[in-house]
Amino acid sequence: MYAMLTLNSWDGEPAIESIAIPGPSASKGDLMEALKVLQVQVQKLIEDNRTLHEENKVLISEKPKRKCCAKAPDELLAYEQTITLYARKYGMTIEMFPNAELLSKQCPENPTPFNS
């Protein structure tokens, strides 16, 4: 009595060949031949698995660690000048106690108007 063993592949590679597994009444030579074929197939699968693990390690090491610089949405780009103006005003009001060097500087000749 023989049973058929077939292993299919998922990634389009050729499937491992069918093996006729001898039944309990088979001779010792048939059993040894089936064992040799199965051991070769297992060794090939182990090598394929090792190769896939190495490829996964390479892919994981090349994976970016952080998110790349993202572009601002278009609705924010439309208000870029307004956002810049408010950022300047915030920058001026956030420093409540400027140091002495800042106070001793000359005033600019054409200051930026705050009502614009």
Image: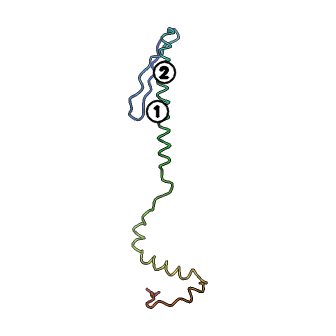
Q: Is residue 95 above or below residue 29?
A: below
User: Which of the two discs, 1 and 2, labels the residue nearer the N terminus?
Assistant: 2
Q: Position of residue 66 (x, y in %)?
A: 50, 57
Q: Position of residue 39 (x, y in %)?
A: 50, 22
Question: How many numbered marks have been drawn onto this rendered protein structure?
Answer: 2
Please tell me whether mark 2 sits on a helix, a strand or a loop.
Answer: helix
Query: 100 and 32: which one is in front?
Result: 100
Q: Point out the image quarter for the C terminus.
A: bottom left
Residue highlighted by disc 1: 48
How crowded pointer 2 is (Cα within 10 Å; few <14, some 14-19, many 20+) is rated as some
Q: CA distance from mark 1 to mark 2?
A: 15 Å
**Amino acid at circle 1:** Asp
- Its colouring scheme is rainbow
Please tell me whether mark 1 sits on a helix, a strand or a loop.
Answer: helix
Q: Position of residue 105 (x, y in %)?
A: 53, 88
Query: 112 and 9: which one is in front?
Result: 112
Q: Is residue 42 above or below residue 21?
A: below
Q: Residue at x 49, y 77 (%)?
A: 87
Q: Position of residue 98 (x, y in %)?
A: 59, 84
Assess whether mark 2 and mark 1 are in contact (beta carbons under 8 angstroms): no
Query: 106 and 69: which one is in front?
Result: 106
Q: Residue at x 57, y 86 (%)?
A: 101
Q: Is residue 18 above or below residue 11?
A: above
How crowded pointer 1 is (Cα within 10 Å; few <14, some 14-19, many 20+) is rated as few
Q: Residue at x 44, y 91 (%)?
A: 109
Q: Which mark is residue 4?
A: none
**Amino acid at circle 2:** Leu
Residue highlighted by disc 2: 38
Query: 22 and 69: which one is in front?
Result: 69
Residue 10 in which image quadrant: top left
